[in-house]
Image: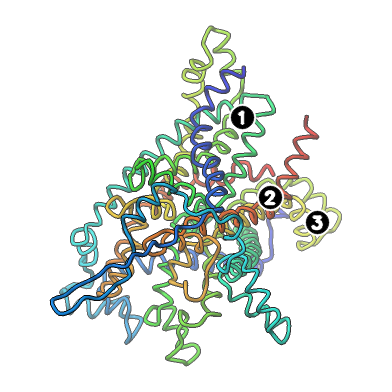
Amino acid sequence: MAAQMERAPLSLKLLALGFVLVWVFTAAFPFIWTVWGSFKVQADFFSYADWTDALDGPTTRAQTGSAFTLDAYRGVWIDNEFWRPGLNTLIVTFSVTAISLTFGTLGGYALARSGYRYAFWVLIAALIFRAMPGVTLVSGYLLPFFELNLWGRLPTAIIVLVALNQPFTLWLLHAFFLSIPRDLDESAMVDGCTRFQAFRLAIIPVMWPGVITAGIFSFLTGYNDFVISAAILSEDNQTMIPRIAAFLGSVQLRGQIMYAVAATVSVILPLIFLVLFFQKRIVSGLTAGAVKG
Amino acid sequence: MPHGTFAKFILPSLTAMFLFIALPIVSIIYQSFFIEHEQIMITVEACDPFRCVEEVRIDAEAMIALREEQPAGRFNGLATYTDSAHLAFSEIQRIWSSSPDAWAALDRIFELPFYRALVFTLAYTFIVTPASIGLGFLVALAVNRIPQFFRGAVVYFSLLPMIVPSLLGSLILFWMIDARGIIGSFLQALFNDPELSVKADPVLTWITLFAYGTWSSTPFVFIIFFAALQTVPRDTLEASMVDGASRLDRVRFVVIPHLAPVATFLLVVSIMDNFRVFEAIIGFSAQAHASSLSSLIFNDLRSGEIPLFGSAAATSIMTIFCIGLLMTPSIRRSWTAFQTKT
């Protein structure tokens, strides 16, 4: 019976395969194209003459002696000091991930183990907070931050991003801790552990898969954020994405749009590798809770 | 878990959310009743070797003193909500009474900044959401039909448009649709029009933004549907085959009803996410032809020397209100589910 079910007509199989191919091409081609093009000069990547110039790079060869050039990367990372926002991004992303996970595991564990009604309300509040666009809160931050002299600094952006990331982290980790049997920490407590010791000794060793998943999403929040960092950080403390946005106007004027292309590819490449290594975790994080309806 | 222990565990997380989400909401409500101070002008005599002229200048010292004294600005009550940059009551009245018919009036009303942003935001939400859910469903069905071996690669490439920051995803496409880019020159060749520019035309700009939105939100829908498809009960499928259901019947009567709760979840999440559309407008440099509620807020915060806090706050409150309206059905549902459970 099962075998009969799998036996789809050939036409249907081909149709499905064709459709999937078109989709994969649509999803992946822009990235492949831009990564490839970032090693060319502008006259090739944005060619008036022929789009195939971006493939073989005749002008790139004429100007640099090779079909591939690192000029754009050199220009952006060294001449335009893109390493500064790069370093800031590293600090923000690392801190956001570490703090989010510390807060999130403690909170998620409590929510999963508390049977009281207020635990439900915390989760509903988190759901509503998750729905609000971050930019709507920015005008609420700016004035107090100016008054308290907190504006423009990295720690401020970090803690705001941690807070905005908490609703999702709490939902994810709470769902994950629900799947860890209660017996595990309860038996530790019967053996004389306090609740925190039970959490540390019995739960932490088995919680890593959930924490890694939540960590990837916290990483993405810190790394990908544009709105909060652009509004809260001063120019010399900027992270990479607002820097690219600020950068666009000026490089376009100077005809050095390839700098922006190289900067964009530099930000995207780590993400492409992240997906490669953590694909399963990302998918399980996305589908956590969703599939159960 | 005792109340005290619960409190200790949840404290860091709750404090962060209270300080940086709940309190700022109160702060923006308060802020929305105030507007920036009027410029204090002083007349000074500016002399050069030949003559002296009187000049009117902004009195910087007095402005600093005034701002220290009243940091929130001047009290304006609800007037910010109704001014020309927001709900624009008086403008609407004027347009309504001076337009020949309702269509002409609506046309002009949708040119007002707030309504222009609202119309785009709603259009984006209600076009991209169904488009990505439909496309994602089809991709999931198709991927479910291809050999196991390829599925990992398909999921990998599908994740990319979603994982890459919106601003950069839109920039990449923006460069491709440039008249000198690959899609731009392809379109010019296709329509045999060397002047064709996707960026210059308002309608094409909207279509581009919708297409980008669909491209970047489809992966999420696909992955959720694909995971849910693995949980379709085989027994029911087999039973329906015994009853003589065709392939299409099986999708219609078994698969779709099984996926319905997942689809509702996707609908809610997609509406929330699409409603905040913003980065794509920057990435496509589309500010001239499209603005969203989020971009309106961002522009106020970035405007000139003095950020328009009051104006941004009023738009924020109205945005949160719209999100609340859109979310009411799902909150009500979880409330009923919770009540039946307890």
> Taking B80 as reference, is A138 left or right?
left
A261 in relation to B182, above or below? above
Q: Which residue is mark 1?
A: A178
Q: Residue furthest left?
A: B49
Q: Which residue is mark 2?
A: B262
The amino acid sitting under disc 1 is: Leu
Image quarter in which the C terminus of chain A is found: top right
CA gap between label 3 and label 1 equals 32 Å
At label 2, counting other C-alpha atoms closer than 10 Å, the crowd grade (few under 14, some 14-19, many 20 or more) is: many
Q: Helix or strand or loop: what does disc 3 sit on?
A: helix
| The disc label shown at residue B253, or none | 3
Mark 3 or mark 2, which is nearer to you? 2
| The disc label shown at residue A100, or none | none
User: Residue at (51%, 49%) from the top-left corner?
Assistant: A137
Report in which chain the residue with disc 2 lies. B
The amino acid sitting under disc 3 is: Phe
Q: Helix or strand or loop: what does disc 2 sit on?
A: helix
Q: In this orientation, which residue lies closer to the viewer: B254 or B329? A: B329
Q: Say which quarter of the image contains residue A99.
A: top left
Report in which chain the residue with disc 1 lies. A
The amino acid sitting under disc 2 is: Val
